């Protein structure tokens, strides 16, 4: 089932790219494997997927250690500062940076481990109370402040759009994130690029691609619905 799902998602990505006049090579599919066993990851790997997303530090490091092949691990969930040290040398990209204090911690651990860490700034474009992420207005200042830290590089922006039955509802948020990236790019801040836009999940990745997503994070659309244990 996983292979068929990935095939379908890839077709939809290609179709969305055609509609938007974009090259499908600009869009990377991240398979969000949170709560799923490594056997599911192996199955996805057989179709050529090398980018996987996790939202919990412990689960990410366990899977990282279990799977021998080099993969691109994406930290997409809220990150606590005391857990940064476990992942800085393991992840391809941290999508969920939303404060200077967290960025300072990543920088500190990166310097200590002598690695360079790529990050995205998480923006709460829909300004939902329940969500993590920076307010749009504060994002540019945060980026200025982070840009001077050693060992850390801002590559773009990420957002989690509201849950909705109609993906068209989220088009405006994706447009706004893209516009924010364009505005920040124009500031030409040293050590900052806006080449990555991480937006779009199972329910809305096609719309996100039409609006400029370069990374889409698809979980249930690939692995099926998640079984959360009590206490998660
Ligand atoms: C779980 C998760 C996803 C994947 O969600 P689906 O709706 O299952 O595709 C994407 N992004 C983040 C930040 C997530 O936590």
Image: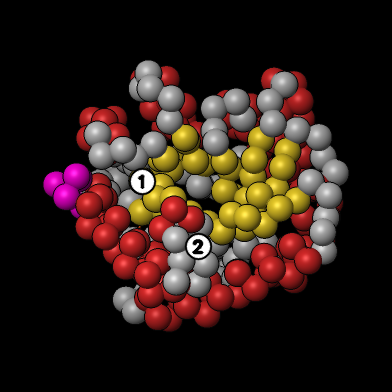
What residue sits 60% from the left and 69% below the top?
Answer: 177
Provide the secondary structure element on which disc 1 rests.
Answer: strand
Q: Is residue 7 visible?
A: yes
Q: Measured from the top left, where is residue 202 in percent x and y?
A: 33, 61
- Residue 213 lies, with reference to residue 88, above or below; the image says below
Q: Nearer the viewer, mark 2 or mark 1?
A: 2
Residue 105 is tagged as none
Q: Residues within 10 Å of mark 2 (few under 14, many from 20)?
A: many
Q: Measured from the top left, where is residue 199 in percent x and y?
A: 49, 61
Task: Point out the stretch of residues depicted in magenta.
Answer: 1-5
Going by the image, does 92 lie left or right of 223? Answer: right
Q: Is residue 41 visible?
A: no
What is the spatial separation of the Cα atoms under label 2 and label 1, in whole angstroms? 15 Å
> Within 8 Å of ligand 1, the CB of disc 2?
no
Which picture quadrant has residue 150? Answer: top right
What residue sits 65% from the left and 73% below the top?
Answer: 179
Q: Earlier in the sequence, mark 2 or mark 1?
A: 1
Residue at numbered disc 2: 213
Provide the secondary structure element on which disc 2 rests.
Answer: loop
Going by the image, does 164 lie left or right of 74? Answer: left
Residue 31 is tagged as 1
- Residue 25 lies, with reference to residue 171, above or below; the image says above
What residue sits 38% from the left and 27% below the top?
Answer: 63
């Amino acid at each position: 089932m996983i292979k068929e799902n990935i095939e379908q998602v890839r077709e939809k990505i290609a179709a969305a790219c055609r509609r938007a006049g974009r090259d499908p090579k600009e869009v990377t599919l991240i398979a969000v494997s949170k709560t799923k066993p490594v056997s599911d990851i192996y199955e996805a790997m057989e179709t050529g997927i090398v980018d996987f997303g996790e939202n919990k530090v412990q689960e990410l490091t366990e899977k990282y250690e279990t799977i021998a092949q080099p993969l691109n691990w994406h930290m997409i969930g809220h990150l606590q500062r005391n857990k940064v040290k476990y992942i800085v040398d393991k992840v391809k990209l941290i999508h969920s940076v939303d404060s200077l204090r967290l960025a300072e911690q990543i920088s500190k651990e990166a310097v200590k481990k002598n690695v360079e860490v790529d990050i995205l700034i998480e923006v709460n474009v829909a300004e939902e109370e329940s969500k993590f992420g920076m307010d749009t207005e504060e994002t540019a200042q945060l980026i200025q402040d982070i840009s001077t830290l050693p060992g850390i590089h801002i590559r773009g922006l990420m957002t989690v759009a509201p849950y909705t039955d109609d993906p068209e509802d989220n088009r405006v948020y994706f447009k706004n994130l893209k516009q924010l990236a364009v505005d920040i790019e124009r500031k030409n801040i040293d050590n900052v690029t806006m080449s990555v836009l991480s937006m779009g999940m199972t329910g809305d990745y096609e719309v996100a691609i039409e609006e400029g997503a370069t990374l889409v994070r698809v979980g249930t659309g690939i692995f099926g619905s998640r079984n959360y244990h009590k206490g998660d």
